[in-house]
Image: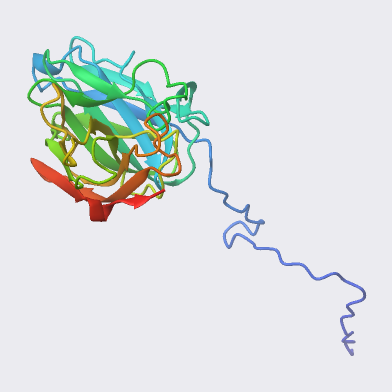
């Protein structure tokens, strides 16, 4: 008996590509990174002693230099055993914290944490009304950035988000901050006798903006000789030991909008490794 071998005919078929799962032989659903992940901050200072019990703290979360989540110190306090857990909230277009949990995409984030120690007085810094005093500042205080006492407790962590994530803060990961100051020596020209502001920001920040959320803010004025230091003003900045992008602005043309044309700016990297000073001269500044 003869078998007929018939040629296969392909008539007018549209070509398509289907990726099959080698095990089930079913079409594979493409993986799309989620943008709805949460980040939970879990604080446990139970082994640190009572000096870190019932104390205010703040946290900021950055992605590629942009603030994406924040918890100001108002309402963020460890309990009587040194514990606290909450989901980080997002920020609005002014970088002010919202009341809604942040929806985070996959990526690596920088989490900055600062905590009051003992009974010293602390100061906070919020987005808005910093570079431009006409802006409305975020309410509910801000990120703890300086102290009248010996130090703050703080930390910085790199957190990989590939789903709902948790960052653990405890007495092992937090350390006393390192005092860092700015010193200006800009001569007796147009930069003398002028107000200035210096900001420490996340190291991935690419430019200063009116709604910037700093990690530390330094203020003061140069004297008639163009000299100034940020020590001796009653509070001391104790940032965590890491590298920061700094921006220093001198109000030559405007003392209320530090980003105004005619003001002067210096920018660079400040690496905090211990008690140190960033020194700036007139050569570091250029006109905006």
**Up/down of 232 relative to 23, above or below:** above
Residue that protrudes farthest toward the right in the picture: 11
Q: Between residues 67 and 78, which one lies in front from this camera angle?
A: 67
Quarter of the picture holding the N terminus? bottom right
Q: At x 16% / y 15%, what residue is drawn?
A: 121
Q: At x 13% / y 33%, what residue is drawn?
A: 175
Residue 3: percent from left, percent from top: 88, 87
Q: Quadrant of residue 220?
A: top left
Is 6 displayed left or right of 255 in the figure?
right
Q: Between residues 27 and 247, which one lies in front from this camera angle?
A: 247
**Color theme of the render:** rainbow
Q: At x 62% / y 55%, what residue is drawn?
A: 28
Residue 244: percent from left, percent from top: 26, 46
Is 64 displayed left or right of 181 in the figure?
right
Residue that protrudes farthest toward the bottom in the picture: 2
Q: Between residues 101 and 277, which one lies in front from this camera angle?
A: 277
Is 43 displayed left or right of 275 in the figure?
right
């Amino acid at each position: 008996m003869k078998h007929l071998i018939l040629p296969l005919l392909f008539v007018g078929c549209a070509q398509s590509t289907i990726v099959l799962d080698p095990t089930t032989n079913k079409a594979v659903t493409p993986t799309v990174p989620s943008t709805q992940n949460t980040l939970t901050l879990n604080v446990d200072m139970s082994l640190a002693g009572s000096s870190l019990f019932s104390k205010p703290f703040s946290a900021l979360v950055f992605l590629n230099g942009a603030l994406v989540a924040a918890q100001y110190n108002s309402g963020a306090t460890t309990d009587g055993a040194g514990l606290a857990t909450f989901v980080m909230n997002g920020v609005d277009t002014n970088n002010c914290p919202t009341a809604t949990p942040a929806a985070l995409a996959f990526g690596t984030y920088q989490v900055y944490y600062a905590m009051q120690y003992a009974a010293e007085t602390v100061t906070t810094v919020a987005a808005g009304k910093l570079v431009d005093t006409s802006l409305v500042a975020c309410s509910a205080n801000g990120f703890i950035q300086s102290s009248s006492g010996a130090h703050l407790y703080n930390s910085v962590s790199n957190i990989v988000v590939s789903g709902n994530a948790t960052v653990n803060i405890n007495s092992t990961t937090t350390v006393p901050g390192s005092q860092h100051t700015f010193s200006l020596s800009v001569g007796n020209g147009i930069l003398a006798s002028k107000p200035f502001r210096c900001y420490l920001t996340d190291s991935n920040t690419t430019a200063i903006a009116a709604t910037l959320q700093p990690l530390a803010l330094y203020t003061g004025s140069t004297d008639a000789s163009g000299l100034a230091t940020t020590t001796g003003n009653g509070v001391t900045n104790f940032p965590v030991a890491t590298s920061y992008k700094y921006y220093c602005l001198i109000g030559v043309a405007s003392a209320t909008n530090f980003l105004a044309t005619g003001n002067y700016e210096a920018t660079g990297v400040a690496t905090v490794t211990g008690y140190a000073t960033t020194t700036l001269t007139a050569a570091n500044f250029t006109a905006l």
